[in-house]
Amino acid sequence: MSPTMTTTATPSTKSRLHTMYMEQVAPKIMKEFGLTNINQVPVIEKVIVNTGVGKQLENQKLKPEIRDTVYDTYRKITGQKAVMTIAKKSVSNFKVREGAPSGFMVTLRRDKMWSFLDRLMNLAIPRIKDFRGVNDRSFDKGGSWSFGLSEQAVWPEINMASVTFFHGMNITIVFRNSDPKMSRFALAELGMPFEKPDDRKKK
């Protein structure tokens, strides 16, 4: 492994998934795509988790139980407090006015990001009902990938018996120095359970 891969932290300080990426996945990416410099390897820069609540507004206000539920979910699954996002412009179809609450979001980096990804792939996604793989067709030109979870129940940290508001979330894994093919390869090597071509044809 090239010394440039360990300049920011020693292996003992990295999460399991981060160590796996640096020591096992990065060399495979270089071989698969003919990269000659370790600095050409894609980097997972951050993970953004967000939940929209625009449709839940009443008189441009959000019920406290909805706000508290989302805050509690994000605190338990990410280890961070969510930030409330505000509508930048009015949308008549959704009866949302400029300045009204529109959602909640968390941006994860470094150790919290890797820990979240590890639990997402190995604990949360396998708990999806009738799961056959996640969609692998939502990569942008820069290689970042987005997908959604329909409800918070897939996270083992959430006790659904005490939940009064059911909500999903959108998750975006932001890559730097990548493209759709390299990002998909990297995530698959990490263990992201993408849907298989045979299962896709059945849909």
Image (spheres, rainbow, N blue to C red):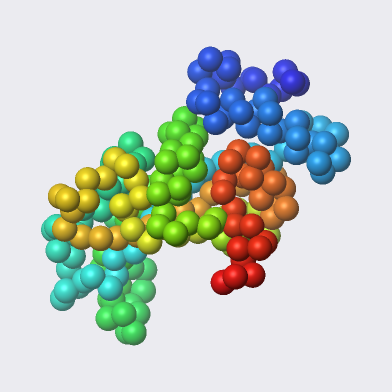
- 114 with respect to 106 (left or right): right
Q: Quadrant of the C terminus?
A: bottom right
Callout count? 0
Would residue 113 be seen by someone viewing this image from the given angle? no
* Residue drawn at (45%, 47%) of the image: 126
Q: Is residue 92 above or below residue 55?
A: below
Q: Is residue 130 above or below residue 155?
A: below
Residue closer to the observer: 131 or 7: 131
Say whether residue 191 is left or right of residue 75. right
Residue 30 visible: yes
- 30 vs 130, nearest the viewer: 130
Q: Is residue 188 left or right of residue 31?
A: left
98 shown above or below 76:
below
Q: Position of residue 108 (x, y in %)?
A: 44, 41
Q: Residue at x 31, y 80 (%)?
A: 94
Residue at left offset 18%, top offset 65%: 62
Which residue lies most toward the bottom here? 93
Residue 45 occupies which quadrant of the picture? top right
Quadrant of residue 40 in the image?
Answer: top right
Q: Quadrant of residue 4?
A: top right
The residue located at (17%, 68%) in the rendering is 61
What quarter of the picture does the N terminus occupy? top right
The image shows residue 42 at horizontal and vertical percentages of 68, 41
Camera-nearest residue between 85 and 181: 181
Measured as percent of width and height from the top left, residue 174 is found at 56, 49
Q: Where does the image place residue 44, in percent across and percent down from the top left?
A: 59, 41
Name the side, left or right, on which 27 lies relative to 173: right
